[in-house]
C-alpha cells in the first residue's frame, strides 16, 4: 500500500509531528491510528493507478478523459458527518446527478479534523472526475485559521457554487431572549454563560458568531462539534443554548417550535423568512453568508469542469428544487466556476481579519 506520509507535503501526519497533533485530533474524535488509516486509504493504489500525481514539482501526465465519461461510479466526498446541511443537500443532489451522468454518485462522509483529511485526500485524488468534493463556507474558515498542507484556493479546481444563504441564529426556547437585543443584554449580564455550538473550531459558524460577539461587545463560550448536525441536536436538547447555521437544517426546528429564531445574518431580511429580523437591524454592519460548492482536484480537465458545471446548473434551475430550497431559506447560486472562486477568495480575506482581531488559535 502507498503510504500517504511518504508524500512531500504530508509530513505533519507522521512521527513526532502527528503525536504532537493528538490533542487537537482527539478533541475532534480522531485518533492517530484513524488519521493514518484515512491517509493510507486516500493514497491507496486504486486511487492513484489512473496516472501520476504531482510530487516534488514533478510533471504530471494523466491520460485524457474519454467522451464516454463516466464509465463507473463517482465518489462525492463530504468532509462532514450525516445530518448537517452539506449532507442534507448532497442527498438531494446525488440521485439527480446519478440520473444526469448515468452512473451512481456515491456519497462518502468523512468528518473530523475540520475536514482536513477528507479535503486533502480529495484534492490530491486522480483528476479523472471520479473523486469530487462538496464543501461549505467552513472551507474558507479553515483556510483562515489553520496551517494546511495544501493551498485551499490554488490547489483545487472550482466547479460550481451551489447555494447561498444567511446563517440563522437560534436559541433553545429556555433562553430568556426573544430577539437579538434581548440576547445581547442577557449576554452582557451573564458574560461567558451562554454556550454556542459550531461545526468545528475555525469553521464558518464559529467565525460568524465570533464576529457577532465582537461587534455586539459580548462574551460567549464556544463549544465545537464534529459537524453542524450534532451541534443542532445539542441546542435542541438544551445542552447548549445557542447556535447559528444553515436554514436548510435549522429552519425546520424553528417551524416545529423546538428552537427560537432570533435573526438572519444577511444584510436584509431573507425573502423566505420575512418575519425573522436581520441581525444587522440590531448590530449595524453585521453580515455573513453560508454557501455550498463543489470542487475537484487541481488538474481536473476543463472538459470535466464544464460538464459538471453544466449538469449542476441544469439541476439547480429545476423548479421543484428551487422551491424546496426557498422553503428552507436557501437560494440557488449556480453560475460559472469563477463565481465560486471569487466568493472563496473574498471569504478567506474576511475571516483572516476576524481571526487576527479575535486572536483565535487553532492547534494543527
Image: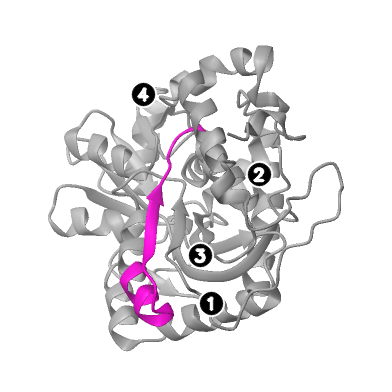
The magenta region covers: 94-113
Element carrying mark 1: loop
- Using the image, tell me which numbered label, if any, was put on residue 143: 2
Q: Which residue lies under the disc numbered 1?
A: 69
Is 204 or 124 nearer to us in this picture?
A: 124
The question of residue 110 being in magenta is answered with: yes
Disc 3 versus disc 4: distance between alpha carbons? 28 Å
Tell which tag, 3 or 1, sits nearer the viewer.
Answer: 1
Q: Is residue 324 above or below residue 252?
A: below
Residue shown at 65% from the left, 21% from the top: 14
Query: Which quadrant would residue 299 be assigned to in this image?
Result: bottom right
Disc 2 versus disc 1: distance between alpha carbons? 32 Å
Q: Which residue lies under the disc numbered 4?
A: 190
- Using the image, tell me which numbered label, if any, was put on residue 132: none
Element carrying mark 2: helix
Relative image position of residue 88 (x, y in whole percent): 31, 58
Tell which tag, 2 or 1, sits nearer the viewer.
Answer: 1
Of the numbered discs 3 and 1, the one sitting upstream in the chain is: 1
Amino acid at each position: 500500500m502507498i503510504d500517504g506520509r511518504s508524500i512531500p507535503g504530508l509530513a505533519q501526519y507522521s512521527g513526532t509531528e502527528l503525536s504532537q497533533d493528538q490533542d487537537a485530533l482527539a478533541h475532534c474524535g480522531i485518533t492517530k491510528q484513524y488519521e493514518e488509516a484515512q491517509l493510507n486509504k486516500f493514497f491507496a493504489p486504486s486511487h492513484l493507478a489512473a496516472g501520476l500525481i504531482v510530487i516534488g514539482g514533478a510533471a504530471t501526465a494523466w491520460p485524457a478523459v474519454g467522451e464516454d465519461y463516466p464509465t463507473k461510479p463517482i465518489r462525492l466526498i463530504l468532509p462532514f458527518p450525516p445530518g448537517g446541511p452539506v449532507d442534507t443537500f448532497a442527498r438531494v443532489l446525488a440521485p439527480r446527478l446519478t440520473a444526469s451522468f448515468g452512473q451512481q454518485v456515491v456519497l462518502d462522509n468523512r468528518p473530523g479534523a475540520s475536514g482536513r483529511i477528507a479535503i486533502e485526500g480529495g484534492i490530491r485524488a486522480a483528476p479523472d472526475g471520479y473523486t469530487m468534493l462538496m464543501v461549505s463556507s467552513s472551507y474558507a474558515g479553515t483556510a483562515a485559521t489553520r496551517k494546511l498542507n495544501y493551498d485551499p484556493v490554488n490547489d483545487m479546481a472550482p466547479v460550481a457554487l451551489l447555494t447561498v444563504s444567511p446563517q440563522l441564529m437560534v436559541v433553545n426556547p429556555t433562553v430568556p431572549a426573544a430577539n437579538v437585543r434581548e440576547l445581547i443584554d442577557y449576554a452582557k449580564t451573564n458574560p461567558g454563560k451562554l454556550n454556542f455550538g459550531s461545526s468545528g473550531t475555525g469553521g464558518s459558524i464559529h467565525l460568524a458568531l465570533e464576529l457577532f460577539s465582537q461587534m455586539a461587545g459580548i462574551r460567549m463560550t464556544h463549544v465545537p462539534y464534529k459537524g453542524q448536525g450534532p451541534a443542532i441536536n445539542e441546542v435542541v436538547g438544551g445542552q447548549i443554548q445557542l447556535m447559528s447555521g444553515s436554514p436548510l437544517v435549522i429552519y425546520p426546528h424553528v417551524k416545529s417550535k423546538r428552537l427560537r429564531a432570533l435573526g438572519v445574518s444577511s444584510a436584509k431580511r431573507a425573502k423566505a423568512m420575512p418575519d425573522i429580523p436581520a441581525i444587522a437591524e440590531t448590530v449595524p454592519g453585521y453580515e455573513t453568508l453560508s454557501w455550498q460548492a463543489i470542487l475537484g482536484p487541481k488538474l481536473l480537465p476543463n472538459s470535466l469542469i464544464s460538464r459538471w458545471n453544466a449538469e449542476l446548473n441544469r439541476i439547480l434551475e429545476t423548479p421543484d428544487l428551487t422551491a424546496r430550497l426557498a422553503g428552507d431559506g436557501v437560494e440557488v447560486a449556480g453560475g460559472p466556476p469563477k463565481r465560486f472562486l471569487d466568493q472563496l477568495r473574498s471569504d478567506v480575506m474576511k475571516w483572516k481579519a476576524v481571526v487576527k482581531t479575535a486572536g483565535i488559535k487553532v492547534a494543527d
